[in-house]
Amino acid sequence: MTIKTDVVIIGAGPCGLFQVFELGLLDIHAHVVDSLQQVGGQCSELYPEKPIYDIPALPVCGAQELVDRLMQQIKPFNPDFHLGQTVTTLDKREDGRFTLETSSGTRFDTATVILAAGLGAFQPRRLRARGAPEWEGRNINYRIRDKEALKGKNIIILGGGDSALDWTLELHGKAQKITLVHRRTEYRAQPASVSKMKELADGETLVEFQGRVQSVFEQDGAFGGLEIASLDGEHHHLEADEVFAFWGLSPALGPIAEWGLDLDKRQIHVDTEKFQTNIPGLFAIGDINTYPGKKKLILSGFHEGALAAFAVQQHIRPDQKVRLQYTTTSPLMHKRLGIED
């Protein structure tokens, strides 16, 4: 069976979810496809408890909390989610519509498509050191699911980017000991986070260490920790209860790269009026797109989604005048949101 619709959103991360909201305000129903088994994208899959500080009006918000709030916000619009499946083919037809199929055999006949796929299909960059694979999912992980479970533990955090530094600061004072291991002295994280980490690094509760992971070592058949080669070539055995590697993602656009889009490396060129790609009716928002001045921020993706929604409305209803109505005062917006006046 083919599902006929006005729009399919590829990607159920924060930007894809907010896109549902903006379309809903314009009375446009959305179908959402995502390769993961749950909504939330990277926020839910990689760092659900990571604090986010730059969402307007929310001084601090956990990544999963943000996803949960977005799901609550879009509830009035009843989107259809198609999870655990990737888009395998996308064809533009002569009538201007798209035929889209997924790995699960779901088939769409849609007027527009919005790519909100973040970095594309992704997997965390894994620890390939000797002995590491057999401890993955037990003592070696790539996301923190429950920070409370780490209280009083001795942990190693691998990485020098924002995720590694954010979690180091977040867990300081909770874990018994944190060893932050980065392969060089320069960090990619925000300078303020690096400065704060260095202030707290006392050599006991927080240790800063430069080196490369060589192998896992065991103690009496149990996980013991990591053997690290420091920058001077010396080998050190760093004991730990758990290891978390935050080396970023290994992204791949997958079939998207074969759709005839104007690509710059792994990003798609869009205009900044409609956030439309070089293919009419196909839009891209969030980290997957690029344009002059592009900033990879969630709030930037929210802005892009708002403008893309109006562009979709214009595309599917070319004879209808596009009117901006405010959710504060518009009875029509209140009706769509299910608000009783």
Image: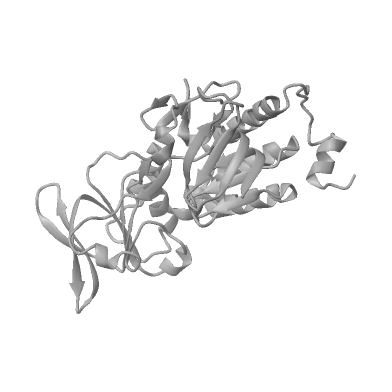
Using the image as rendered, state which of residue 155 and residue 27 is in the foreground. Answer: 27
The residue under the point 81% across, 38% down is: 333
State the image coordinates of residue 66 (x, y, percent, origin top left): 59, 50
User: Total label count?
Assistant: 0
Q: Which colour assignment does the render follow?
A: one colour
The residue under the point 70% across, 42% down is: 29
The residue under the point 59% across, 46% down is: 32
Using the image as rendered, state which of residue 138 and residue 102 is in the foreground. Answer: 102
State the image coordinates of residue 298 (x, y, percent, origin top left): 54, 38
Q: Is residue 94 above or below residue 100?
A: above
Query: Seen in the image, is 257 located left or right of residue 285?
Result: left
> Is residue 56 visible from the viewing direction of this image?
no
State the image coordinates of residue 172 (x, y, percent, origin top left): 40, 58
Query: Seen in the image, is 183 located left or right of residue 306?
Result: left
Quadrant of the snapshot with the C terminus: top right
Using the image as rendered, state which of residue 97 and residue 159 is in the foreground. Answer: 97
The residue under the point 14% across, 47% down is: 231
Q: Is residue 288 above or below residue 43?
A: above
